[in-house]
Image: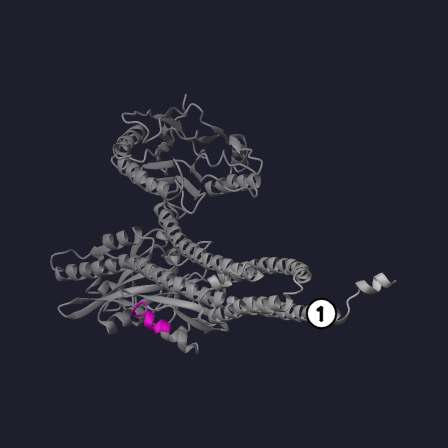
Amino acid sequence: MKKIIRILPRGLQKKTVLLVFIMLLVMSLVFFLLSTHTSKTLTRIVGDTRTEQQQAISQISKETMHSILTGTMVNNVALQAKLVENNFAEVVNNIYMLQSLAEGIYADRDLVPQAVVNPPDPALDGEPSVMCLAEEGVDPSQSEYLGVMGNLARPLLAMLENSDKIDACYIGLADGSDFVAHDQTLPKLDSSSGEPLPFPVRERPWYQGALEADGLYFTDLETDAFTGALMVTCSIPVKAEGQVIGVAGIDIVMDSMMDFVNLSEDQVGIVFVMNGYGHVILSSEREGPFAPGGDQGPLDLRERGNPELSEVLNTALHSETELALIQFDGVNYYVAGAPMPTAGWAVVSLVRQDQTEEPEKAMLSAYDRINEEASARFRESSVRTQKSGTLILAAVVLLSLLGAFIGATRIVKPLRDMTATIIDSGQTGKLFEMKDSYRTGDEIEVLAESFDDLSRKTRAYIQDITRITREKERVNTELGMANQIQTSMLPHIFPAFPSRKEFDIHASMTPAKAVGGDFYDFFLIDPDHLCMVIADVSGKGIPAALFMMVTKAILKNNAMLGHSAAEILSSANETICTNNKMDMFVTVWLGILEISTGRITAANAGHEYPALQQNGVFALVRDDPHGFVIGGLEGMRYRDYELQLRPGDRIFLYTDGVPEAMDAQEAMFGTDRMLEALNRAASSSPNQVLNSVRSAVDAFVQDAEQFDDLTMLCVEYKGPAAGTPEPKAAE
């Protein structure tokens, strides 16, 4: 008992132990309070930092997207305006030519015969023809101008037949008679009497407008007096010796202009063409305020009670606008416009603001994910710190006060610096950067490194999003324009030859990418010979599309020289091999149908076997002699062979994209399935034959991606024209 009492501290020793014990209690309490305060401070800093950096990201994203839109939308709408302007240039050139011809022939009226211009002939309905109309009470046979102007029948018919944009061309004369070239005569005749309907020539808007303008004039969107179709008329006065003797006019078909405002599937926004009255003439929208005619008829968009929109539209009629943000019908739009000086119109493009905010949402989502990962690392580090602090506190009892003071100073000072930096970052938008004062070797440094890593990733992410968005906009624009150019190069108006009853032809092309390497073509070499071409260029995309256009032009030029099918391919091969630095090649099947006999003279340069329908059944022409591909080797010669079509026979041409179409299991469609689809539509029109094959391919492929261009062409021979003897059956 006495030994134990001697071991216990007494006196100064006891006081020292008690002092140390009290100091330990005090230090433990201080450590607890300091840890709690530090934890709350760090939590608050992390929360404030997250909010401030989200605001900074949102602001930078909006500024970046606005900069991109300013560059892309303004440039795109200017390019769109130039495209539509160039399209109108053809009509303007024709109207000036018509004015010049009319004034010239009237100046020489004493030297030219008086032509006879008949009223509308119902037998010519559906065929381009010239005719005369007149106002109520006006006898066109007494016109002093009509007989002279009748000598312009051929030029008017040539303008009508050679342009898919022109619905009618005419010269309204000052005496109330009208000299017209049009393909519709029945609407101009009284259904009961068969007599021509009176036509108030001098009261029509195109006539009055041209006189008031005393020059080139474009009407508003008008309804045709006979057919009720919507169109725009370009007109100009015709003068002789300073006096107006009439007005020349050309009706522009609106449907033919739609390709210049329609957007591709992967583009967003609205594009429309507005005339000088503020009325929408063409639009990528089919309904709504920006569709032709709008919600309530042809209203002036500038008078819809929206000053911001009115200012942009008024400016766009005269000059290119800057990118503007407006609100229309409760929706925010980015809008830009560019003028069409020839017609006094404008092209306007709009994009909804909410569609441009998707990159910002993606960045904020990525930031939240990165922030959560950093917070998790911070929490794990805090747990480790508490354990280490407990061990250190037990080991350094005598230096606890000094250690606490030093530790508190070391913790608090970097946090103050970090907080000041983060506050400055939130106010200026400058991202967080690592400093030497944060390199404390403990959790403060881990937190600072997390902030620094987060800032660097955020900066890189913004740069990547900016670059990707800009590149995608550029590529989409270029591919969209390339697709429009390629589509316009191929025959795409069906029926292709409505006046030819001896045959029916239809074709289609679906590229695997925005633009493809397949192509088809058909054209009349002369009234009795129809040339048909289908081809497949090696490769895909822009290079294949360019090579396609060159090859198509070479083949057509050689065909128009009257060569045989084999000679056309041989000549084209020599031309292409001469300058084929990219070593590209093309497979071609080319046939020339003699319409009066049904005989096809064909040649094949490495292309697929054609399918021939005779006696109601499609079968492959496997004895089709194959030559080498065009562009592969100089000096190649190709062989002609003949196919005889009887009335009702069909020939089906295609590229390898049809039999080689694959489903999700990589099984091919094959020629057997193709022949089954052809024979299901054996008695149908060429268009229905193509639809049958395409439906069969789609049902087989389902959701699998299309890897190759899919191009088809079908011709049905209906027999020679009346009076032409049928060919003898081949022995």
Q: Position of residue 242 (x, y in %)?
A: 14, 70
The residue located at (62%, 68%) in the rendering is 404
**On the image, which quarter does residue 557 sit in?**
top left
State which quadrant residue 533 falls in.
Answer: top left
On the question of residue 527 being in view, the answer is no
User: Which corner quadrant holds the N terminus?
Assistant: bottom right
Q: Nearer the viewer, residue 88 or 702?
A: 702
For the C terminus, the image quarter is: top left
Q: How is the image coloured?
A: one colour
The residue shown at (62%, 58%) is 381
Residue 727 shown in magenta: no
Q: Residue at x 38, y 54 (%)?
A: 474
Is residue 116 among the parts visible in the rendering? yes
Secondary structure, mark 1, is helix
Percent position (x, y) of residue 413? 53, 69
* Tally of numbered tags: 1
Decide which of 648, 686 is in the foreground and name it: 686
Q: Which stretch did the figure color magenta?
A: 312-320
Percent x, y for residue 622? 45, 24
Q: Nearer the viewer, residue 443 or 503?
A: 443
315 in the magenta segment: yes
Q: Position of residue 415 (x, y in %)?
A: 54, 68
Relative to 691, 146 lies left or right: left
Q: Residue furthest top?
A: 731
Q: Extreme right residue here?
A: 1
Instruction: Residue under label 1, please give it.
Output: 16
Q: Which amino acid type is marked by label 1?
A: Thr
Number of other residues with Cα within 10 Å of mark 1, as a class: few under 14, some 14 to 19, many 20 or more: few
